[in-house]
Image (cartoon, helix red, strand yellow):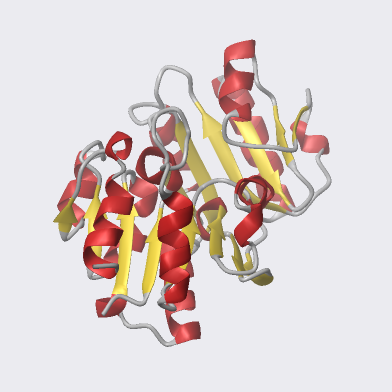
């Protein structure tokens, strides 16, 4: 019996227009009635997620910033703050490479977007975001560094970031254009394990959905692990099951099939 469901947002639960499934409210409320825990697991920050899911803040669990900030039914469960000197080093390193950088912290998200299209991309994922010319001046607890490369980051920017920071930090591909840097050991999967242990749910009782490399550890911590048909090829190799695309309401269909019939 499935007792816990965790789903990624972009490319998974949301369609390409960043919209929730039409039957989302109905499905989630039916899950609550069956005492099945529902977890939103995202690279997005809590300030963004709590706006989108304001109706459910006391009922859901939120794995934010790829596991760096976790809120369980309205209560902060865990937080992992990056060293301030590392944040400044990353800002300077990315500036030299011409990469756009975002600092996701307690009080907001700061970025140095270089044109309107980049600003619009950032605004589609983050609320409470502020543009700054010199991000080394940001004075906040930063949970995640998100790096954006407009031409695609996997073949160039990611490799350079991994080489520079990968030994001491978790450097993850989180999308075609995005790489995230968190403290070592911080992943969606470690956050999911914490939640499983907290509420007494086993691997065999957990369902998870994902589409990109920052979802790997989360999928590895659930037996009912589903890769979207639009997922990165590496995700399809990790997941135990396949489902349709994010544009076909596939997450809700699988939940209804396995949990609500």
Q: Position of residue 3 (x, y in %)?
A: 36, 77
Between residues 31 and 146, which one lies in front from this camera angle? 31
In the visual, does 250 lie left or right of 5? left
Q: Residue at the far bottom: name it.
A: 200
| Count of numbered badges drawn on the protein | 0
- The quadrant of the picture occupied by the N terminus is bottom left
- The quadrant of the picture occupied by the C terminus is bottom left
Q: Which residue is drawn at 41% across and 74% down?
A: 36
Q: Where is residue 88 in the image (x, y as percent from the top left)?
A: 71, 41
Residue 187 visible (yes or no)? no
Residue 167 location, quadrant: bottom left
Q: Position of residue 90 (x, y in %)?
A: 62, 39
Please determine whether, in this image, residue 154 is positioned above or below residue 192. Answer: above
Between residues 211 and 152, which one lies in front from this camera angle? 211
Q: Which residue is drawn at 60% across and 43% down?
A: 145
Between residues 89 and 242, which one lies in front from this camera angle? 242
Q: Position of residue 66 (x, y in %)?
A: 50, 54
In the visual, does 94 lie left or right of 47? left
Residue 246 visible (yes or no)? yes
Q: Residue at x 75, y 38 (%)?
A: 128
Between residues 121 and 92, which one lies in front from this camera angle? 121
């Amino acid at each position: 019996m499935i007792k816990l469901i965790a789903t990624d947002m972009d490319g998974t639960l949301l369609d390409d227009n960043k919209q929730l499934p039409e039957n989302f409210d109905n499905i989630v409320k039916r899950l609550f009635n069956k005492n099945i825990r529902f977890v939103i697991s995202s690279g997005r920050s809590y300030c963004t997620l709590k706006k989108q899911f304001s109706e459910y803040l006391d009922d859901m669990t939120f794995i934010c910033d790829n596991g760096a900030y976790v809120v369980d039914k309205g209560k902060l469960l865990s937080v992992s703050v990056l060293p301030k000197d590392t944040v400044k080093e990353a800002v300077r390193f990315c500036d030299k490479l011409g990469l756009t950088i975002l600092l996701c912290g307690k009080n907001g998200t700061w970025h140095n977007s270089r044109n309107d299209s980049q600003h619009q991309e950032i605004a589609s994922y983050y609320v409470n975001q502020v543009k700054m010319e010199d991000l080394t001046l940001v004075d906040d607890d930063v949970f995640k560094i998100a790096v954006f490369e407009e031409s695609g980051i996997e073949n160039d920017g990611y490799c350079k970031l991994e080489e520079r920071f990968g030994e001491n930090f978790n450097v993850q591909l989180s999308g075609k254009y995005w790489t995230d840097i968190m403290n070592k050991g911080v992943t969606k999967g470690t956050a999911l394990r914490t939640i499983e242990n907290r509420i007494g749910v086993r691997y065999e009782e957990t369902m998870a959905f994902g589409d990109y490399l920052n979802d790997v550890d989360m999928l590895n911590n659930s037996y009912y692990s589903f890769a979207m048909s639009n997922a990165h090829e590496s995700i399809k190799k990790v997941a135990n099951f396949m489902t349709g695309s994010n544009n076909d309401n596939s997450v809700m269909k699988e939940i209804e099939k396995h949990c609500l019939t």
